[in-house]
Each structure stands twice: as structure tokens, then as C-alpha cells.
Amino acid sequence: MRKQIVWIAVFLALLLVPALKLEGYYYRTLSMIFLWIGLASAWNLTSGFTGYIDFGAVAYFGIGNYATALLMTKAGLPFFPAVVISGLLSGAIAIFIGKHTMKLRGAYFGIATLAFAEAVSQIVLEFDRTFHITLFEGSHGITLPIAHDETFFYYTFLVVVGLIVFVVFLTDRNKFGYALKAIKEAENSAELAGINTQRSKVSVYAVTGVMIGVLGGINAYWLTYISPLDVFSVTHTIHMIIMALFGGIGTVFGPVIGAVVLSIANETIGASLLYTYLLMLGVILLVVVIFVPSGFIGLLSFRRFRK
């Protein structure tokens, strides 16, 4: 209970940050950290709880980006309705993809989701040239209107990410979450115990799709310009995975810690020493996987147990 109180206090404190009248750089940096917390937590909800490692999560991020951009620029919808529709669209696509890919296990699932993400990226990139119409704008990308200041996006990211972490928290402690963990530990045994494993997997995959799609929609309006090579980059998925692993995969607050630490590292090191940062990510991944598979949260729990 004490841990939850601390996180609630942190969230409330973050709500008061704009009262400090900080420079725009700090709001942009914090918004970026919130975005990665949301992406890592959403990815963890499926992959961390079920053990099905998704290498195609960036597909829903890109879909959310492009759906919001098209709804705002082509259909003239306001930002919030466009983001909600984008999230629901991402979730609907996740249901369709999940029904087929969630029948696969191990590396086959990972390969299938990675192939799906690459396929969506190529569709967006080549659609206009193939069908001779102007929709996705190909490699030129789409420019969105500029209408809000940095504090608007700060609060938008903070509230949405707070809801995502809260959903993960509730899932971790209810019957549905226990079913997902049973699937991770022994899927065949879970089926014998009466759990509809396929429905559970597809359901959580759809929720993850909605979350990532909404974050993608906010990202599009925040950046005001998107292109397929950026929003569908597999690097985004790799960052989600490393952040969740670093903090503690399958935990509630592990991905939060991983996202905060690695986002700050990216901002301070990656901007000036890109290759050093990429090397650091590789080393972190190796160390975590080999020596601390339970991540930072697991390491803290182990040290507390030793005491």
C-alpha cells in the first residue's frame, strides 16, 4: 500500500509542475518521458503478462499516428475525437491480428507480429503511388495544424499515461490478470483449469492496441509532422522492450522506471553520442537478460528479501 501511495503522490506532484512556469524544453522532455512510459507499460501488458513477446507493437503506434493525422487533416475532426477513433481503430485491428497470431507461440508469434508491422509500414509508404491517389502522402509524410502550447500536451500525455498505468495496476490484481499470468507460466495447464486462453490473449492484445494507438494519435498532433519511416520504425518497439526489461517485465511499475531512466539517458547521451547510446542499450539488454532477468524491480525485491 505504501508503494501505491508514493506513486499517487508523484502523479499529483506532476500535475502541479506547470505552475512552476518552466521553459518549453522541460515540458517537451517530460512529455517525451510520459510517452515512453505509456508505450512500455502498454507493451508490457500483453508481452509481460502473457509471455508473448510482441515485435510488432510499433504497427499500432503508426496506425494511431496516421489515423489521427488523416481524421484531422482530411475529415476535419477535432483532436480528441480523432484520437479516440484512432485508438478504437488500432484496437479493432489488434483483435483481427491477434485472433490469428495468438495461435502461434514463441519465436513464431514474434516473427508474425514483426512481419505485420513491416507490412503496414510498406502499405502506408506505397499506397498513394500504387493506387494513384493522395491519402497517406507516401514518404513526404503529413503535416498537422499547430494549435496548442506545450502544457496542453504535457497534461494530455500525463493523464493518458496515468490511466494506462492504472489499467495495468488493476489488471495485475484481478481475475483477468491472474489468467494472463497463468498463460505465461503454463498455457496448457491454464486451459485445463478452464481458462479460455485464446480469448484472454486476444482481449489483452486489443487493449494494448488501443493504448498504443491513442499514444500514437497524441504523438502525431504533438510533433505536427509524421512520416512512415519515423512512426513505423522498429526502433520504437526495441525501445519498448528494453525499457520494460530494464525496469522489470511483467510488473506494474517496472516499465515506468525503465522508461524514465532510459528516456533521460537518451536525452542526455543519445543526442550528442548516438552510437555510444546504442552501444549502451545493447550492453543493458545483455546484462539484464543474463544477470537480472527480473529487472530493476526484481533486483530491489531480492535485496529486500536478503535483508
Image: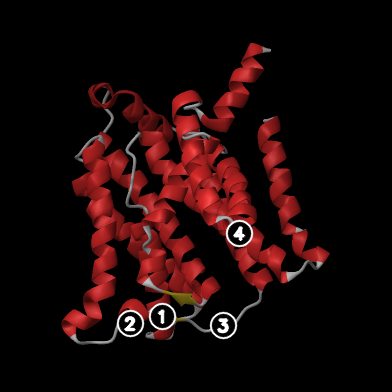
Q: Name which of mark 2 and mark 3 comes first in the sequence.
A: 2
Task: Look at label 2 and name its amino acid.
Answer: Glu
> Circle 1 is placed at which residue position?
142
Mark 2 burial class by Cα count in 10 Å: few <14, some 14-19, many 20+: some
> Circle 3 is placed at which residue position?
146
Q: Which mark is residue 107?
A: none
Q: Where is residue 300 in the image (x, y as percent from the top left)?
A: 62, 25
| 302, above or below 48, in the image | above
> Circle 4 is placed at which residue position?
272
Horizontally, residue 170 falls left or right of residue 31, namely: left
Q: Is residue 6 visible?
A: yes
> Circle 2 is placed at which residue position?
137
Q: Which of marks 2 and 4 is in front?
A: 4
Q: Position of residue 61 (x, y in %)?
A: 40, 61
Task: Look at label 1 and name its amino acid.
Answer: Ile
Residues at marks 1 and 2 touching, judged by CB atoms closer than 8 Å: yes
Between the residue at mark 1 and the residue at mark 3, the CA separation in whole angstroms equals: 13 Å
Between the residue at mark 2 and the residue at mark 4, the CA separation in whole angstroms equals: 31 Å
Residue sticking out furthest to the right: 20
Between the residue at mark 1 and the residue at mark 2, the CA separation in whole angstroms equals: 6 Å
Q: Where is residue 292 in the image (x, y as percent from the top left)?
A: 51, 26
